[in-house]
Structures are given as C-alpha cells and as structure tokens.
Amino acid sequence: MNTLKLGWVGLGNMGNPMVMNLLKAGFEVTVFNRTKDKEAPLIQAGATTANSLKELMEKCDVVITMLSNDDAVKEVFESQTGLLSKEFLGKTIINMSTVSPETSRYLASSCNTHQVHFIDAPVSGSVKPAQDGTLVILVGSAIADYELAKPIFDALGKVAIHVGNAGVASSAKLAINFLLGLNLQGLAETVLFAENNGVSKEDMLNIINAGACGNGITNIKAHSILNDSYPAAFALKHLVKDLRLAKEAGLDSPLIHPLFNSYATAEKEGLGDQDVMAILSSLKKKH
Ligand code: NAP
C-alpha cells in the first residue's frame, strides 16, 4: 500500500488508464473530471470522487493533472474554486498534460506563490503504454520533488527521466512529438506512394516493419492503416497543438512548417478528433 494520497484531474484517453495503474499499485486515488460520468469506471475500480478541485487539494498530498491543453490546465489551476484557490502548504501538483514550456514555468511560479511544489511531467507514449504502465515520463522539477513523486512515476511508466527544472521537460516533450509527427507523416506518404504504384499497403507495412526503417510507432499504427479506421488513441488535434507550441517555442527548421500545415489542414477537414494516423486519410484525398 502506497501511503501518498493522490488526486487526479482529467479522465480522457490517457487519464483513465493511468489512474487504473495507480489503483493497481495500491494508491488511494480521488478523481475529478469535468464530465462526471467518466469517473464511474474508476470509482467502480476503487477510486473516490471529490465535489470540487479545492476539495481535491484538501484531501490529497499530490494532485496530478492530465488535461487537453494550456487553457484547460490554467483554468483548472486558477479558477475561483481551482487547485490554487488558496495556499496549500507543502502539497504537490504534477502536470502531465502537454503544454508550452512557458506555461510550465508560469504554473511553477503560481504554485510557488501558493506554497505548493510543482512538477512538470509530460509523457511520451500513447494509450497502449498508458494501459501497460510503460510510458516514458519526462520530469522537470527540484530533485527532492522528483524523488517524492518517483513511486507514482514507477506505477505509470517504464522510466522517468529528470531533465532539469519546470519547463525543460515540456520542451523535451515538444521535441519528441515533432519526431512523432515526422514519423507518421513519413509513414503515410510512403504507404500512399507505394499503393499508387501497385504495392499493397499490407506488403509495404511488412517491408517497413521487417527492416531498419520500422520502429515502435510504425508497428503500432500498422493495424489502423490496414483497417482504414482511426479511433483516437492520440487525437490529431493534440498533435496540431504540440506542433504549434513547438513553433512558438522557437522551432524553425525546414520540416516544421510543412509538417504543421499538413496536420492543421487535416484538422480543418474535420479529422481533429480522429487518431493522429488519420493524416493518411487527409493525404489520400490529395494524392
Ligand atoms: P483527451 O482524451 O482529449 O482528454 C482531455 C481531458 O481534459 C478530459 O478529461 C477533459 O474533460 C479535460 N478537459 C478539457 N478541457 C477542460 C477544461 N477546460 N476544464 C476541465 N477539464 C478539461 O486527451 P488525452 O488524449 O487524454 O490527452 C491529455 C494530455 O496528454 C494532452 O495534453 C495530450 O497532448 C497529452 N498526451 C496525449 C497522448 C495520447 O496518446 N492521447 C500521449 C501523450 C500525451 P471532459 O471529459 O469533460 O471533456
């Protein structure tokens, strides 16, 4: 039994399986989600609920947020009944959502004003690693705070890499998602080029995944490409957000601009709530 009392805000595609793993590891977890009915499966699995974010802070030692974007996270921290609605001496908040490095530094400073420790801890890995407890966790915080949170990270991921202070982990997350976007854009373009020249997508995916160009993500996405079905594990709109944040954080390389435009176009075409691999559907229409 882990003695830290945990609170969790945000039960979307990632939050739900992550909380399940904390419960399995023996943590006492209180959950809070804007859409209340998403709490039901976790309450059935042993979690409790709180009536407000303020109550969550009062009940818990450590509160973790896993929310869509910068605005959602700021709202949850700063609203009148939010996580920072008063001073909470010695408590810790861990933000695992992907937000800008600037927002992470801002949240660290707001927490400091409210006597709360802050850990910037975005994750690399999607729903399957979240379910399997094999996420890669990028940590920006004081070392003592990282050490306090280590048992939590051990239940959620295969490794937690401390990269510096708050903000640095968010920069690392934007960098790895740039590579993710490049990988999936490249995979989609390759499969479509091959198909247009008489190579079946089955054969092309086998060629990719049997050779040195195959990797974890090309393997994971093969199934959805073969079925031409893209239910969201990582929603395309979230990658558009991450590429936009990377640009705003100074990424100005030859590939970022066409890459951002490609995913942003797919979002405008109505694919934002589909999985990021739906970039292939968008490109298929054009080529
Ligand atoms: P998601 O399925 O879209 O869930 C978003 C969560 O945020 C939901 O619980 C939603 O509440 C809540 N939310 C949104 N706006 C809110 C607001 N204004 N106030 C309160 N709650 C709000 O997202 P996800 O896929 O779990 O991703 C969460 C974060 O992790 C994102 O930053 C994403 O970029 C990052 N991430 C995702 C993946 C992935 O593969 N999915 C991988 C790594 C990192 P409702 O239920 O009420 O809508």
Image (cartoon, grey):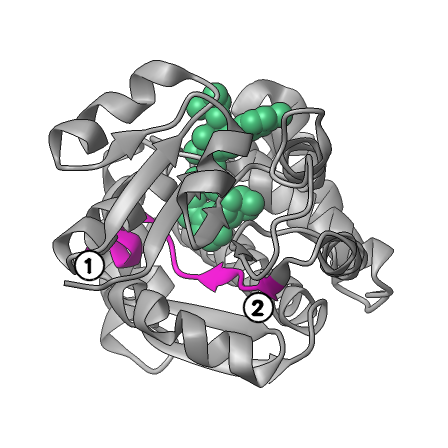
Question: For the residues carrying marks 1 and 2, which lies nearer the camera in this image?
Answer: 1
Task: Check disc 1 and report the residue beneath it.
Answer: 132
Residue type at mark 1 is Asp
| Mark sitting on residue 242 | none
Q: Is mark 2 within 8 Å of ligand 1?
A: no
Question: Looking at the image, which residue is at 32% across and 38% down?
Answer: 30
**Residue at 56% across, 84% down:** 143
What is the quadrant of residue 269 in the picture? top right
Q: Which residue is mark 2?
A: 176
Horizontal and vertical percent for residue 85?
68, 34
Q: Is 126 one of the magenta-colored residues?
A: yes
Residue 114, x across and y down, in percent: 72, 52
- Left or right, 119 with respect to 247, comes to left
Q: Between 136 and 208, which is closer to the camera in this rendering?
A: 136
Residue nearest the viewer, comparing 287 with 215: 215
Task: Tell me, yes or no, whether the highlighted magenta stretch contains residue 252.
Answer: no
SS category of the residue bearing label 2: helix
**Which residue is at the front of the view, 47 or 14?**
47
**Tag 2: Cα neighbours inside 10 Å, few (<14), some, or many (≥20)?**
some
Q: Amino acid at mark 2?
A: Ile
